[in-house]
Structures are given as C-alpha cells and as structure tokens.
Image: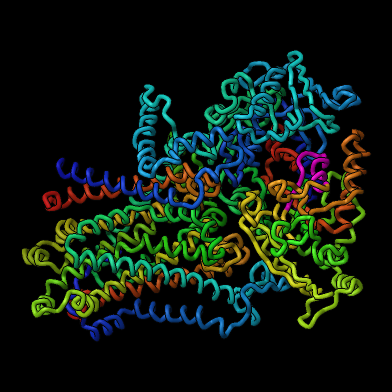
Amino acid sequence: MPVYTVRRVLVAVPTLLLISLILFLLLDLAPGDPTAQLPLTIPPEVKENIRRSLGLGEPIHVRYLLWLKQFFVNEPLHLLSQLTGLDLGGDRHRVISWQTRSPVVDLVIERLPQTLWVVGLSYVAGIAIGLPVGIVSARHQYGWFDQVGTFVSMVGFSVPTFFSGVLLIVVFSVELGWFPSIYDTTHRVTGWDSLLFQLRQMAMPVAVLALYNAAQISRFMRASALDNLTLDYVRTARAKGLSERKVIFVHVLRNAVGPVVTVVALGVPGIFGGAIITEQIFKVNGLGQLLITSIQASDLPTVQTLTFVFAVLIVAFNLLADLLLGILDPRIRYG
Amino acid sequence: MVEAVPVRRLLERHVVRQFMRHKGALLGFAFLVFILAFVVLGPLIWTLDPQFIDIRARNSGMSLAHPLGTDQLGRDMLARLMAGGRASVAVGAAAMLLSLLIGGLVGLLAGFVRWLDGPLMRLTDLFLALPLLPLLLVVILLFREALRAAFGPEAGIFILMVAVMGITGWMQTARVVRGEVLTVKEREFVVAARSVGVPEHRIAGRHVLPNVLSPIMVSATLGMANAIITESALSFLGLGFPSDFATWGRLLFDATDYLQQYPGRVLWPGLAISLTVLSVNYIGDGLRDSLDPRSRSTHAGNL
Amino acid sequence: MRIYTMRLAGLAMLAVGVLVVSAATAAERGRDGHVSIIYWQAPSILNPYLSGGTKDIEAASIVLEPLARFDASGNLTPWLAASVPTVTNGGVSADLRTVTWKLREGLRWSDGSPVTAADVAFTAEYCRDPAGGCSQLARFDDVTAVEALDDLTVRITFGVPKPYPYGPFVGATSPILQKAQFGDCKGARAPECTEANFGPVGTGPFRVTGFRPNDVISLEANPNYRDPAKPAFATVTFKGGGDAAAAGRAVLATGEFDYAWNLQLSPEVLKGMVAAGKGNVVSSFGTLVERLVVNLTDPSPKRGEARSTRAHPHPFLADRAVRKALSMAIDRKLLVEIGYGQAGRPACNVVPAPEMYASKANDDCLRQDIEGAKRLLDGAGWRPGPDGIRQKDGVRLSILYQTSTNAVRQDFQALIKQWWSDIGIETELRNIDASVFFGGDPGSPDTYQKFFADIEMYANNFEGADPESYLGAWRCGNEPRPASQWQGENMPRYCSEAYDRLLGEMAVTGEISERARLARRMNDLLVQDYVLIPLVHRGRVSAHARSLGGVRLNTWDSEIWNIADWHRVR
C-alpha cells in the first residue's frame, strides 16, 4: 500500500504542474496588459511592483517559473510561518488581492471550511442515498422502484441548481419558515442548540447538491451492480446457497463499488462547479462566492489563485478516490 | 457518466427495437423532436417579435394574444421562449459537436497510433481534473472584450462559450472511442482485412467508425445536456450573453425575482431546460441500454 | 428631502410608539441586544480612503466618523466637530482661503485614547501622500496645508478661495483615522496594513470584532462612545453578498435580517415582499438623475480627427426645435413606473435637490406631448419623407442612441425608441459594457466622453449638497476633445456665454440663498436649451424590519449614518 500511495501522489504532482501551466498560459495569452485592468486607485509605484513580481518583459519560461515559485514556495512558506509563528516568509512577495488589499491565500483559508463542509456533506448524503438506491434498482431492474429511481435521478441531473435552489428558498424559507435563507458564516457550534442551527442553515444548500450527487451515484451503482449480477461468481455464490442478502451485500457490493468510486471522483469538478452556484444562491460565502465577486471586480490575482485552488482540490479528491480504490481492490495496487 | 460499453456487433434492427421498447427513451426522443420543431419552426407560425415591447400589455397572464403571457415590458413570452430556445439549443449543439470532434479525433489517434496512446490518455486525465466552471468564468473575464470587439456581443460570447465547453468536454468521448477502437482492432474481420492489405485509414473508415458511432451518440446526448445547463448557469451568474439577448437560462434568471408574483414566468423556461435535458438524458440512457449486449440478453430473458 | 413609506399611516403610528418607548427605556447602552444588516454587495475593506465603493464606505461609517456630515435632509451637521465653521461664526476666513474646525471636547477612540487635532492632520497627510493611492483625493483638492493648532483645533488652508470649503473631513467618504493605528501605514505601505484596513479604530457607536472580507463584519458597542446611553444595540452583524432580491426577501419576507440596503427591485416584486408584513420599505431621494445627453457636434466618422468636436456642429441636433421635440415625446411617468417605481420620480431638472436648489420652471415636461412635438417639427421645416422619417434639405432625422448595458437602461432605450418613431424620428440602439462606457480609456471609441453617437444616456449626481463643481462640468472648454485626451465632463459640448458668466459669479459668492438662485438659473439654461434631457430622479430604496426603530434613510451621506439611534421597537 505505501508504494502504491507514493506512486499515486507522484502522478498527482505533474498533473498539478500542467494545470498550473494551463492557467498561467491562459492569463498570459489574454489580450492586453494584465495590469491594465488594475483599479485606478492603485498608485503607479504599486503597479510597477506588481508588474515586476509578474516578471512582465521577461521571457515566457522565466515568468512561468516566477509564477510557480509564488505558488509553491512563497505562499506555502507564509502559510507555515503563520501556523508555526516562526518567520519563514520574510520579505517574500505575497499575492495581494486588488480588491481587499490583503493576501489572497488568507482569504482562501478563511473560506475553505464553508465550501468543504457543504461539498463534503452533500457527498456523504449523496452516497448514503445513492448506493442503496442503485443496488435495489439493479436487483429489480425495470421494476417500479427502478423506474421511479431512474426518473428521480434524471431530474436530479436535469434541473439546474439555480432553479431548484431558489425554489427551495421560496418554499422552505419564505412560505414555511423552516430554514434560514441566508447562511451565517460567523456561527460557531458550541452546543446542541447551535448545532441544530448549523444543521438547519446547511440543510438547503446540502440538499440541492446532494440531489445531484445521489442521482449520479445511484446511476453508476445501478450500472455497476448490473454488470456484476450476471457474472459467474454471483451464480456460484447463489448456487452455494448463500442468502440473497449476503450475495448482494458481501459479494456484489464490494465488487461493484470500485468503478463507482472512479466515476464519482471524475464527477468532482462538476460538484465544485455546482457549489459555486449553490453558494451564490444560499449566500454561503465560500470559495465560489469569492470567485464570483472577484471576477466582477476584475480582481485577477484572486481569480487566478482560486482557480488553482479548485484544481488542487479536484486533484486531491481524485487522489483520495484512487487510494480508496486501492484499499477496496488489491489488484489495482499491483496492477 | 459514460462507460466504455463493448459492442460486439451492431445489430441495427435489434437496437432500434430495443430503443423503441425503452419507454423513457422513446418519450425523450419524441419530446426532443418537439422542442427542436418548437424553436426552429415555431417562429414561422408564431411570428410575434420577441423584442417587441407592448408596454400596456405587460405582466399579462395567459390569453389568446399571448398564450404564455408577457414579461415586465410586455414582450410575448411564447416568442421569447422560442428565441431563447434557439440560442440555448444552438449553444448546446455546437458545443457538443466541437467536443465530439476533438474527442473523436483524440480517441481515434490514441487507438490507432500506439506511441501517441500514452501521452494522449495522460492529457485526457489532465483535462478531467480541470475545474470547468471556474475556468470558463476566467476565460470569459479575460477574452470577452476582445471577442466582443471582433464579432459583436452575441457572436463573441457564443464563440467563447462553445469553444471553452468544447475544449473542456471532449474527454469522455475520447476515452470511449479509444476503448472501442482497441477492441475492434483485434477482431477477426479487422485482422483479416489488415492481412489482405487494406490500408489503415480504410479500416478506420469502413470498420471502426460504424462501430464507435453508437457510443459516440451516447456521449453526444450527455454533452449536449451538459452544455445547455452550463449556458444557463453562466447566464445566471451574469456572465453569459448580453442582458437583452434571450436564452432559456436568461429567461429563467430574469423571472426568479418574480417567482411569487408570476410563477408561470419561471415555470416555462425552467420546464423547457429541465425537460430538454431530461429527454436528452433519457435518450442517452435508452441508447446505452439498447447497445449493451448484456442488457439485451437479460432483457430478452425477461420476455 | 422627504421620506416615503409604503404605509405612511403605519409609520406615523410607529413613530409615536418609538417616542414613548425611547423615553421609557433610554438609559442603558446595549439594552436591545443584536441587530443584523444585509448589504447585497459585500464590503471588501473598512478603510474608505482605499476604496471608492459605496458598500465599503457605508460599512466603515459605522466605525469611522467625519468632523461634520449631512443629515437626512442634506443639511450640514457638526459630528465630531463642535460646530460647522462659516464666515459668519469666523470659522472660515474672509478671503475664503482658510477654515478652522474645533473638535468636541472629551472625544475618545474606541481604545480609550483621546481624539486630537493631530489625528485630523494625520488623516489629511495619509490621504494626500501621492504613493498611497487614496481614493478620496478629490476631497482634498486645492488644500495646501492641514495643521493642528492645539489639541482640539485644526486649520485647513486652500490655495484658492473656496466659497464652499466642506470637502475635507465632511461626509462618510472622508472620516478621521487614528494616527496611532495608521501612522506606519502611509504611502506605498497603505495596502499592506491589512489589520488596520480590516479593523480600524474609530469613534463611532460600534467597533469591529471580526471582519471577513466580502462576507461579514461583526461589531459590538463601542464602550467609549460619547453618548453613554447609545447605541441601543450591543452587537451588529453586517452581512454582505447575494442579490437585491435575496436581501429584500431576508428582511421583508422571512424577517431574518433587520435592515437591507439599496433594493433595486421592480416595484411589483417589492410590493409582493412587503405584503408579508414583516418590514417596511423606505425611500429617499438625493441628486441622482438619469438623463439623455444631446451631442451638439457632428459625430460622423467622415469628420475624422474632428469627430464629435466643436469644429463641426451637429447636422440636425444643433436645431433646438428637434431637441425640444425629443424631450416632448417622452412619457417620464411611464419610465418611472417601468424602471424604478418607488425609487424614482419624473425629472425635469438636472439639479433636482436640495429643495432650495431645485428649479420649478420646467415642470411642463411631465406631460408627454406627441402631437405638440410633431407640430414643432413641422413648424421647423422637418417634414416626413416617403419612409415616414422626417427630413429637411436631405438631412434625415436618424439618431444613434447609446448607453451602458443594464436591464433598466435597455428597457428605457426600447421605449424611447418607440416614442421617437411616433414623431417620425428613426433610432438605432446601442449598448456598451459599463466598464468600457464609463471606463474613460482614451484608446476606446466607445466611451461616454468620446460620444461618437447622437444621444447617450446615463445617470449622474453630485456629492454633498452643493452643486457648484457639478454645474461647472458644462463650462465652455471643459468638453472632451483630442487635445484633452478626451477627458472632461461637458459631454454635450455646450458653450454658452451666459452660462459661463453665472458660473464665474457663483465661484465668488458665499451666501447660500444667492448660490441657490444662481444654481437654479444655470439648471434652467441647460434644460431649456435641451442639451440635457432629464428623465428620472432616482432615489434609494431600503427596507427595515418593523421592529427596528430610528431608521432615517439618508442619501446625502452614509445610509446608516444614525445607527447609534437605532433601537428595538417593542
């Protein structure tokens, strides 16, 4: 397992590097001087500093290396010194948001928890709903449960989150008054009451994303279980006289869940995309909302950093899925 | 979303019959045909200008003059729904075609040219890890002005959206096509063809393409559904087409403010998006089921 | 200024209730617990000198205060100063070149240290540092020195006579910073002082306890606030983000928040929300006027370098009759109804307020007169051609009408186009992205300064209550042109001797009612020459929970200027 883990991590590094190259080139190939869009209130000296830190005028590979250094050396060092209290960052340049005039990474760290909570919980909910629905659908293919399940998951795919979100707000906040329509990011969980409040304010954003997740997972689970149900080992297991419950839960589930993990990992970018919209609707003010406000303010450093952070998160989730797969299916580790 | 389904032989008639038996897919197909007719032929029958303002008839409900009512400026909702649908479906179709083109090309190359296989598949993996929506937002931020100046506000955004969705949406197709090519390549009839000296490009054209066509269609349907949703999401975030240019996403976004006063105005574009995507998804589902040989056998066994 | 509410009677009863309640319990600071405010644009910084955004300036106004500010009626009111200096009380020198402010005694910062004139002088130094990129530099125009004479007295010296010297330290855009906190943050270091910029020490009723940029600000009552009985609330949550509809919903429909800012929503949507009975809508009007600007010069590309310059008069808009007909064809009431509802009223003046500055000579514009416009054009020799478009001597009345991209503006364009076609004038519409249109980039042909079109539409206002510099925009010679790199504010390229003479007179007049008369006169010249065609006087609409008392909407200063007086109505 350790060898496998190391190998997967090593594969993730060039992926990240390449993504960073794409992001860099995107910004670089954009027409016009990137500092031309700076707010007028920024004085010329500061502009010059920004230009220099971007290495404008240098050849393209030098600029890319400078950019890499910023993301992989300078910012992590600052982060480390914040965590440990030691001064490791020194005078190194930091990526400063043009809008808030504060280091972008600090903003990201402040907002990461909200986004991860919502995305993470919606995943947990999605799996909790999607797996059993998928298995039951497969067991009784074309039965009424399967038909209904298919329809509901299709709806989950097809209704845009910004539509279902607003609908939920109108029904559950305005008409029924069950849940708050605006997420309180300053809320701290200290006891049962505050935990209850936290759950209530997360209910709607998580529900919207979870519907999407559950739809996806149940479809894959159904397909994967169907594949396995016709295989010889299932027939053998049944022939041995094992109970249907045991056949399904011990044998089929274990074998069917593998491909699902891969496919779900591939769906992660979609989830983060959906989270951007959901955050906007429910005012969760996480990374997605930060991205939107930065785009509206033409705050390029923040936009660039955030896109990269999204890429890092996606690669991390994929890595997690790979490792999970390695645990579930020993063949992969040696493959 | 799409699995690489091995297709042994294209049993065309059987597939069609299978597809017809899939009620959801059949309904979906019928609805899609209806939607296409609605947005393409509809304006020929319902000739009201979607931009015409009849201020005195604003916010009117359903009536003979305005079957779906009017918006806050008195523009006819039916005409706007048709115009908006044309834009949304055009974006969806164009983005889907572009991603098919790229995906098919990459898949074929990876399948046929052995030394390209590794690098191309790594590239595919890389693209799968790209954050699509953030990337799309960034690209729009950076390139919108330049393209707007060159092609005008609507065409500029159209090109931009289609290009980015195409460039970030081809990976599934590429994987499926590659898998299909690799399987087909080893089949007896292909091996036989090669042994009698049929050149590679003829093999690709005559034997492989017909076989990969069906899985491509599956990913095409899903790609289109995705593109329609993405376009509407961009309109929702205020980064899509200009505000006065009707698309389904835009209509829906403009109407959400009036959700409680005029629920109908939200309902129609919302239904149009959801049902179109739903039908496209069902078609994809039906295609997959009818193309899958194992589902064929199980289903046949059920009969 | 007037405050309109949806339920005037209800508000009146509420106000009576307020008086009783506040008399009974006005004693203890923080007695009313928590109040929550939502701004659908999220504040990104709490230092108004580093941001031009209204959201940032208003959020900061809870904490930072100026020497004087404008009250809800637009009157100058002493705030940290003991009184407003004038020529009469000797605060302003006879030559109008110096102004001397005296601070109130006993003022303390929220950290307990005394507020001194040195803080005021430092604030000027901070903003005037050329490397600091101060957003409010214009408020310090013509200032040559700001000196602390003693602990409580500060003197501002101007390089030229200033009949209206209330630029520096007046209003929410120019509050006093604490020298001890910002001393090391001058010049190029200004943006680096994140901690200070996110949590300034102030004199206001609340102090910052937590700031999440673009998200939420937490505040608590300032223990050193000058009035021991205020503020009534112990803590404040200031949430940002989302959209106007969500903010309105949170106050009016679900009651989650107590106050929502700037609800730019269609009248109908607001009405639906108010029906829930959780809150009230308040609106108030400043000086913002949506107007059409007429190009008096020829924008035709064939003029080359001299395009849209005074070298060539406009082929048909140079005719006053055509300009007047354009104005007569417009139904301003309908525009208001469609676009702004309660947040707008028909406008016939470019200086709509304060009351004494607003002319009443142009009110006949309120009536749409299509037939009159047709007769006027007929009389001036503009006859309908074969295609129905009027023409004279081969010149067709065909207008290119541009504005920024914005839903309401595009609605307006479409409507006005229809009216003009009714009187035989052809219109082509064009909308340009706001960042380009207002961007002022001399390289772009699409800016509102270049004005390569016949008519353009946008809104403008003036800060504070004195319109002198605003009216100065239409001075002859202030028009954008190649020689000025297309900078300048005289968009119509207006040039009138009478107008310039009035401006010169105003620059040396200190007496307020005389200044008001001159301003009205200039407004009438502009409007009756039809170089500016006012459309809508736009107001601000906000909402507060029924249980929140003391709200007095103020469009002249920060909207939440009197948050110290807010309290819970029981």
Instruction: Give the image quarter of residue C364.
Output: bottom right
| Membership of C467 in magenta stretch | yes
> Which residue is located at x 63 percent, y 49 percent?
C441
**Magenta region: which residues?**
C459-475
Say which quadrant the N terminus of chain A sits in.
Answer: top left
> Which residue is located at x 37 percent, y 51 percent?
A122
Depth check: C113 or B186 in front? B186
Horizontally, residue A163 falls left or right of residue C402, namely left
Residue C116 picture location, percent across and down: 70, 17
As drawn, the residue found furthest toward the left would be: A240
Horizontally, residue C432 falls left or right of residue B24, namely right
Q: Image height check: is C9 above or below A39?
A: below
Depth check: A28 or A257 in front? A28
Horizontally, residue C25 falls left or right of residue B133, namely right
> Which residue is located at x 44 percent, y 48 percent?
A27
Q: Let me know if residue C531 appears in the view.
A: yes
